[in-house]
Image (cartoon, rainbow, N blue to C red):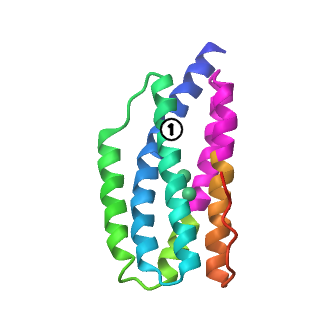
Amino acid sequence: MEANRRKARAALVRILQKAHAAERGAAIAYRGHAASVRNIIERDAIVHIERDEWEHRAKLGAMLDELGAGTLPLHEIGMLAIGSALERLCFVSGRRLPMFCAWLLERVNVEQYATAARLARAAGCPHMAPLLMKMEQAEADHVAVFDGFLRGVAPVPAVH
Ligand SMILES: [Fe+2]
Ligand SMILES: [Fe+2]
């Protein structure tokens, strides 16, 4: 039992560390994405999503602190580099490709936070699960926004 809990805790830390790095990469990519779109409704929605990602990163940092774990420096640098490259790419890639990539990545994020919430319970940190599920819902809302953009439907930005 104790071994299972330790294993879950290690897996939870790992997933939170990866998400912490990825949220910054995503936020930076969205900064470029928002600046590159012409439609004001799309821009506002992407700015809102960027804000969500910075918020998620801050919350993940607090959870890692609580677990006595640090961040993964190489992963942080790698995601920073990818986010910065995507930030610039948005200006030359046309409208649909960044929307599609964002839609795909957000779907992965939904799964990631669902898994993290399960691991939090298994690791003996059930108080973290509601917050992780809230982040899962936020990522699902992001999926819906990009899905709408790809289908040509204006989104109603969710407030978290
Ligand atoms: Fe996020
Ligand atoms: Fe997101």
Pick whichever, 24 or 4, lies toward us.
24
Q: Position of residue 101 (x, y in %)?
A: 51, 71
Q: Position of residue 32 (x, y in %)?
A: 39, 70
Pick whichever, 76 or 35, lies toward us.
35
Q: Residue at x 68, y 26 (%)?
A: 126
Read off the residue under disc 1: 60
Image quarter where the N terminus lies is top right
Tell me the magenta residue range: 106-134
Q: Position of residue 69 (x, y in %)?
A: 42, 26
Question: In the rendered view, does 145 fall on the left or right side of 87?
Answer: right
Q: Residue at x 66, y 65 (%)?
A: 157
Q: Tag 1: Cα neighbours inside 10 Å, few (<14), some, or many (≥20)?
A: many
Pick whichever, 50 or 77, lies toward us.
50
Q: Secondary structure at mark 1?
A: helix
Q: Residue at x 30, y 58 (%)?
A: 81
Q: Main secondary structure of the magenta part?
A: helix
